Image: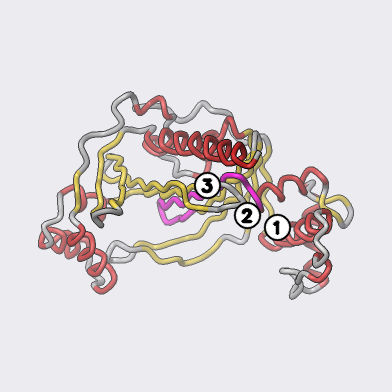
Amino acid sequence: MGTFTSVPGPTRIIRISDIAWSVAVDAASQKLAAHDGDDNAANTPSTTAALSQETVNLAWAELRTAGIARGDAITDAWLGAINLILSPDTLIRLTAEYNGLSGHSDLSITGSRGACVYRRRTIETLPNGGTRITGRESGVEISLFNAAQFWGSAVRVLPPLEELRADAANAGYVIGEDPVVVPSEVSAALAAHLQQTPDDDGGLAAALTGLGAPAELTDVVVHQTASVTATLETPADVRVLAWAGMWSLANGQLYSIRARADEGAVTLTRVQPGHVARELSFALVGAYDFAGSAQGSQA
């Protein structure tokens, strides 16, 4: 197997409370709107208006301690960072589930700068194979990174498993084997079964066999250790979903899962460690090309 990434990580990492971050984003949004000449900036309702003055004061104290604010104002450096987070050229959303935790990350990239906002929730696996949210952590992690070292920041928010965190080079030249196709009628029947039947694993496996599902699908659904989903949206002014990917780790095997929009079927492909990094990197390069062509057409 490959090794964990050697790509440098974020240049700065800050962990603060959700309330403090909300106050920072609210204050920055107001100032940025006023700076852009928005006549309605002063009349824009504050998202933190319902907070008590004591809570707001504590939030500002936390922001000052973290270096995000000076006095009762967001620093210029963090104004730029929050502006990047609010209006990125490229937005990558990652959701990863592993060992009772679900991590949600928004990685915003514009030019050479990047920022990641990361939150975690606790989850439990239901008898039918689904998951349910059981709690939310009260804090948020914000990290700043060089866009050229994107993977070094993305890997931090993935489960600590080599199959998911390996560098792209470890995937080799052969990306994966021939995909296993799950017919649309099987995937639809499975979705209905998961929604209606609180089976145990044995019951779910039997149901999959009854549906004529491939063995690989049973492996992914019943024995999944971790999963990662990713989407990429670009650019800021015409925000569209440009790419999406999903991976499942089951019994030590990493699968790439893709939907066939034209057929309604799903494909499962056995892939090597490093595939997540490779696909995300390719998607990001495509986003850069798209943004560059969009800017060129407007020139």
Q: Sequence order check: which comes first, mark 3 or mark 1?
A: 1
Mark 1, residue position: 21
At 75% from the left and 58% from the top, the residue drawn is 29
Q: Is residue 17 above or below residue 281?
A: below
Give the alpha-carbon distance from disc 2 to disc 1, as whole Å. Answer: 8 Å
Residue 289 percent location from the top left of the image: 52, 35
Point out the stretch of residues depicted in magenta. Answer: 87-103
Q: Can residue 106 be seen in this view?
A: yes
Distance (Cα) linking label 3 and label 1:
20 Å
Q: Which one is in front, 232 or 62? A: 232
Mark nearer the N terminus (2 vs 1): 1
Q: What residue is drawn where x is 30% and y is 51%?
A: 259
The C terminus sits in image quarter = top right
Residue 103: percent from left, percent from top: 49, 53
Q: Mark 3 points at which residue?
A: 92
Closer to the eye: label 3 or 2: 3
Residue ID at (41%, 25%): 169
Q: Is mark 3 on a helix, strand or loop?
A: strand
**Foreground tag (3 vs 1):** 3
Q: Does residue 135 appear to the left or right of 44 in the view shown?
A: left
As helix, strand or loop, the secondary structure at mark 1 comes to: helix
Which residue is labeled 2 in the image? 140
Report the magenta stretch's main SS.
Answer: strand
